[in-house]
Image (tube, rainbow, N blue to C red):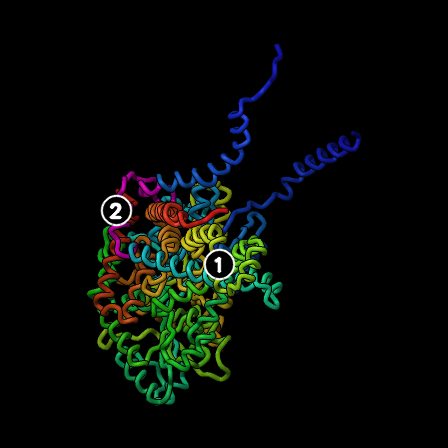
Amino acid sequence: MTMIKRGLAALAVGALGTALAMPAFAEPVKFDFWFGLSGDLARVVDTMCKNFNESQKDYEVVCTSQGNYDATLQNTIAAFRAGKQPTIVQVYDVGTATMMLSGAYKPADKLMEENGYKIDYADYFPGIARYYATSKGEMLSFPFNSSTALMYWNKDAFAKIGKTEAPKTWEDVGADLKAMKDAGYECPMAINISANESWQLMEQFSAIHNQPIATKNNGYDGLDARLEVNKTKFVQYVTDLKKWYDAGLIKIKSKDLGQDMVQAFASGTCQMILTSVGDHGTVGRTQKEGMKWDVAELPVYAGTARKNSLVGGASLWVLSGKSDAEYKGAAAFLNFIHDPKTALFWSTNTGYIPVTKSGFDYMKADGFYDKAPYKGREVAIASLTASEPTEITRGVRLGNFTQIRAEFGTQMQAIFANKVSVQEGLDTLVKNGDAILDRFQQTYPGKTLP
Amino acid sequence: MEKRVTFSRSTIGILFAVPQLLLIFTFFYWPAGQAVYWSLTLQQPWGGGNIWVGLDNFRSILANADYWNSITASLVFAGISTGLAMFIALVLAALTDRQLAGSRLYRVVLIWPYGIAAPALAMAFRFILAPEAGFMAVVNQVWPGFWDPGLDGADAMASIIVAFSWKYVGYNFIFFLAAFQAIPRSLIEAAAMDGSGVIRRFRDIQFPLITPTIFFLLVINITESFQDSFGIVDIMTAGGPANATNLMVYKIYSDGFKGLDYSGAAAQSIILMLLIIVLTIFQFRFIERRVHYR
């Protein structure tokens, strides 16, 4: 009995002590940040969170990796339905339309304004900002990890066929592929069609050539947008890829078959690939000893006025239903990420590019792009800013786009396995894709994209 | 005038059953009911609202050629993998039961595959069957282009069937072996003394006596092949190439969780449930007749 009494007394004293100490050591306000990166990248995010927590005393961000982008969105939706959502969540590029209609977010620009932060939105590279902004230009989320597609080319192999520069047009690519094959290269170029390669093959290609993917300015102007890739320059592109594949100039490389295309390029097996600038670091770290390689902008068909390529990656959304204190913390965190110094830290440790001009300038001034492992990544910025974004090259704003990407993979597989012709395959892609868009539109009756 | 406090039989029975009923209700009927409700509405993924659409979800699914392709793929997968898993397990169990040298070791080892989680197992088979790097690379050296699960649907289907069967051989083996060992030795010995050989004894004595086990495993294997195939498909083929391995359960996952089409996925899972129920009824109605319970 006395023990209990004594215990209770101690507790009371303890509680009193805590209460008295409150003003001096205020507990920092905790808020959650869920993200979809894993492995090395997750560790970089964790470090960034730690840096934020150490940079001030009022807030503490708790960063949790959900494994991948799909799982992050799924888990966030489940958590939101149960009222246990994180304050900030990282949502991938193609989830933007879904987020905009969710009614589950607090607009980023409003959040920053309410909490007294001045963000210069004109500082964002237009190609990046427009992808995530509404059709009126308001920023509902903050661009975070960003990349774009580049062509990686093996300088040694090109030297063998007497070239010192990467091909600029697809016509040149065709000739170079053939020359390399004749010079004895088994795999002049590697592609994959089974995962999310819709990104570099369809989306980036269409943007650079200023070709629409869907009506209504790629969906920016309404939920009744429908695909139209079966009647653009994209048809010719797929036809050429298929022709080169049949001639043995292009090989399909994927993890399921043994080696993915990045590994195939880094090991010197294949001489060209089209992939994200985010793989720049991986290629550098895993390349065959002494192999000389570089990156270049994606080629265009001869006579095309090149437009900006699209940003890939994810943005940070602030969800609704949180307390003011948590929003204050979220705003401070977003402001921290926006800082050019964080941009430098982020880009140094990942392959991602800075999202603001000031971040890019800061990194340039720091000499980042002159040093060996990072040299070449500025090509990504050049590609993203090749032109002022047009109505079509702002981005792709289509509902359930993940499913459309999957459908792209399915139809490309059918085309490459000779089950259907190129035109038939793309017609089916449009037909099935439109059914997905139809369904999305029906799910949100009477709603419009902001 | 003796007064006894008693419970009626039914009350006490129900009382005892309540915990179990609650569990079944919470984890089966309630979610199933929810799925039925979702399948009749269009759900906004973020919970912003829904609209009643009646049977529209079912209509659009059943009008979709991809869905029928998915049903066909599931039936092919169920048929072949069940047949393979049961046949191999039966042979292995029969041999183990004959006390061949080392059968004690087999008895333990053959059970292991069932203990491996489907994704881990699928990962292993992905390496083994990779056309460029794995065991099949050797075959491809001899006949170039023979094995290409990346583009050839039949090859991809074969890989997931092999992986699934490999796992269920272990499961079936345990049951078959137990069934064989439950057969009185005297029966077999008597037959042997009458001069019947191994095959004959198997056909006339052992096989008829284990039909209840065969029937049980048939039902379980077919049901599991519709449900447990998910991890294997996800890791090995992701439903490709060109939907060749897009089994019903995988399509539910990708439409529901990747595509955020909760209503369509709910409707598909109702159809899958009905299909499994029909298949099971069919088996009890027509195959069980040939089963001899002792």
Q: Residues within 10 Å of mark 2 (few under 14, many from 20)?
A: few
| Residue type at numbered disc 2 | Arg
Q: Which residues are magenta?
A: B38-67
Q: Quadrant of residue B258?
A: bottom left
The residue tagged with tag 2: helix, strand or loop?
helix
Tags 2 and 1 touching, CB below 8 Å? no
> Residue A26 location in percent, x, y?
61, 43
Q: Name the residue beneath numbered marker 2.
A: B59
Residue situated furthest left in the rendering: A231
Chain of the residue on which disc 1 is drawn? B
Q: Nearer the viewer, mark 2 or mark 1?
A: 1
Give the CA separation, mark 2 to mark 1. Answer: 35 Å
Q: Is residue A374 above or below residue A118?
A: below
Residue A339 part of the magenta-drawn span:
no
> Residue B118 location in percent, x, y?
49, 59
Q: Name the residue beneath numbered marker 1.
A: B168
For this rendering, which residue is in front, A98 or B256? B256
For this rendering, which residue is in front, B213 or A436? B213
First along the sequence among labels 2 and 1: 2
Residue situated furthest right in the rendering: A2
Residue B57 part of the magenta-drawn span:
yes
For this rendering, which residue is in front, B289 or B148? B289
> Residue A407 location in percent, x, y?
31, 60
Quadrant (top left/top right/bottom left/bottom right) for the N terminus of chain A: top right
Q: Which mark is residue B109?
A: none
